[in-house]
Structure formats: C-alpha cells, structure tokens
Amino acid sequence: MSDDQRANYSYFTDITTRWMDNDIYGHVNNVVYYSYFDSVANKYLIEEGGLDIENSQVVGFVVASNCQYKSPIAYPQAINAGLRVNHLGNSSVEYGIGIFQEGSAVASAMGTFTHVFVDRSTDKPVAIPDSIRSALEAVLIKDA
C-alpha cells in the first residue's frame, strides 16, 4: 500500500498553516510536521475514541515518529492530514499519517507516529481501552 496516496487514508482533518510555521526558506519547517501528526492522531482519539485528555486514566505517550518529505507546503495554505492505523498491538498503535495540499491526491509528506498507552499515575503500559481500540480498528489498514 502506497503511503503517499490520499485514497490510502480513512480519516481526514483540515489544518491551516500558520505564519510561524514557515522557516527562513519560505516553507513549513520540518519540525512542524510532527505537530500536525500529533494533532490529527489526538483529534481522532478524542472525537472517535472518547479520549478525555484531562481526566482519562489511560493516555497515549509518543515513543517513535518519522517523516518523509516529498514537496513543500507554506503559509498561507490549507492542508489535509490523513490518518490510518498501520499496526495495532495490545498497548501500542502505529499510525500512518499523510499531509496533503488541499485537493492533491499525493502527499507532500508522510510518516508514522507511535503511541504506547500507559496508566497516567504509573506511566506503565496498559491495554488500549475498548472505546479507543474500536476507533483504531475502524481505520486499521488491511493487508493486501
């Protein structure tokens, strides 16, 4: 499955680039893409999985991330962040995320973002809560 095609992502959210996202070269700085990744994954968990970021006993910690850049984006520009689940374990999930220019079928950047779910009070891994697991299963890619 190609990571750079819009059709290979199930969930999308709109993001508007900000003035501060641009670097001296006139495009969104590489580090900002990771904030886009974090935003789309957590928005999905909150809206679809019922995660209460302030009160949930179980929360997701980022343990790994990577990004590949294919074409620049810049302020002011509307973009879409696509999300899917590449792998779902007992306490962890690896998301696949694509950043698309509005209307483009091919990603400007794509990468992975891994959460390990932990007990908020102990920071120890725990099983993914059922409501979150159900939401993650809904966007899990199927092997071809």
Image (tube, helix red, strand yellow):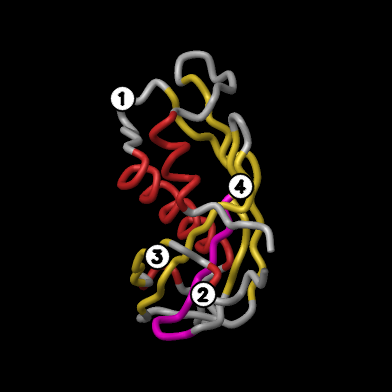
Answer whether residue 90 is magenta in the image. Answer: no
Proximity of marks 3 and 1: CB atoms separated by less than 8 Å: no
Label 1 sits on residue: 55
Q: What stretch is highlighted in magenta?
A: 95-104
Q: Is mark 2 on a helix, strand or loop?
A: helix
Mark positioned earlier in the residue sequence (1 or 4): 1
Instruction: Give the prevailing secondary structure in the magenta stretch.
Output: strand
Q: Which amino acid does label 4 sit on?
A: Glu
Which quarter of the rendering shows the N terminus? bottom right
Mark positioned earlier in the residue sequence (2 or 1): 2
* Real-space Cα separation, disc 2 to disc 4, in angstroms: 19 Å
Mark toward the viewer: 1 or 4: 4
Mark positioned earlier in the residue sequence (2 or 4): 2
Label 2 sits on residue: 7
* Real-space Cα separation, disc 4 to disc 3, in angstroms: 17 Å
Rendered position, 144 above or below 48: below
Q: Is mark 3 on a helix, strand or loop?
A: strand
